[in-house]
Image (cartoon, grey):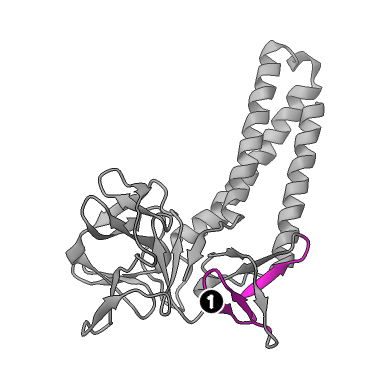
Amino acid sequence: MYFFHILILGVLHATVASTEVKEEFPQLCNNSVVLPLENIEAHDDGSIYDPKSRVIYPKGTYWKDEEHSIVYGCPCELERPCLWKCCPYNQAIHSTSNNCTAHSAEANWFKPVVNSDDGKWNRSVTGHEHIVVFYRHCGEGMSMIAEEEYILRGADGSMVLHKGEEPFQMEPDTFCVDYAVDLERYVVYHCSNVSNIKEEPDSLPSIRTVIVHIIYPIGMFISIFFLIITFFVYAYIPELRNLHGKCLLCHVASLLTGYVFMALLPTLPYYPLSFG
């Protein structure tokens, strides 16, 4: 019982702490790309300068965690579009295994080609025009896109996929770009575990968004409620406190712990790295 009480107190504390963070830090980053910034320089107009990525964050694109003395920025809310790199900056990808491998190259070597909307020009990505965010956000859900089926838009960092009857646009956080060492060229991977088609501005939230951020946590908390009832029934009825009942209590406690963290997981941000 003491373990169960400690577990419940821990869950309540985590839930309250999560709520406090949400209230303290407004959700400025609409696409959830959040970067911790170090050694920043504050300007009189309210903006800050990040010397690592050589980027100026205007007021409203960053916030401060006074308690931990950390400043968080929203790089993809700036004027320059974001482009996702599959592997860390000093690594490239192997197209056969989809694993990152060390890649020794000169500084600012990562320069994939982006195109104009009308297709009249193409040029390499530069730090002055794009913010490259490298973080393997695709996880295991990576699938390479054929070179002739897409173009990377230089205007906003999105990708237009020419597959099927009608081309459609994919947002920057639904794919990643990297250099394939075995193919000796740049390749694009679709992150199949995220939504890929751009929604119209006035359209309803996507089905995936509703399931992941609304239905999924609600279902988890319903399960947690009944698990708590089951735990108390087996803990307080003497006839059920036999060997089978104690084994079931341990099983329920394990499920309860896992379900709590799984329910809170979609609400937690991730912290990729970036360079300009």
> What x and y, as percent, mark residue 255?
62, 32
Left or right, 209 with respect to 105, comes to: right
Q: Position of residue 223 (x, y in %)?
A: 62, 40
Question: Is 32 placed above or below 57 here?
Answer: above
Residue 168 relative to residue 108: left or right: left
Q: Give the extent of the magenta segment.
A: 46-67
Residue at 81%, 23% (x, y): give it. Answer: 236
Task: Return the residue found at the far bottom.
Answer: 45
Residue 223 in sight: yes
Q: Which residue is mark 1?
A: 55
For residue 57, side relative to residue 4 (left or right): left
Q: Quadrant of residue 158?
A: bottom left
Locate residue 272, reporting x and y percent: 52, 59
Could you tell me which secondary element the residue under label 1 belongs to?
Answer: strand
Image spot of residue 103 (x, y percent): 34, 52
Q: Give the amino acid at mark 1.
A: Val
Name the residue: 46% across, 56% down.
135
Residue most extreme to the top: 243
Q: Is residue 164 above or below residue 126?
A: above
| Residue in front for this viewpoint, 55 or 233 | 55
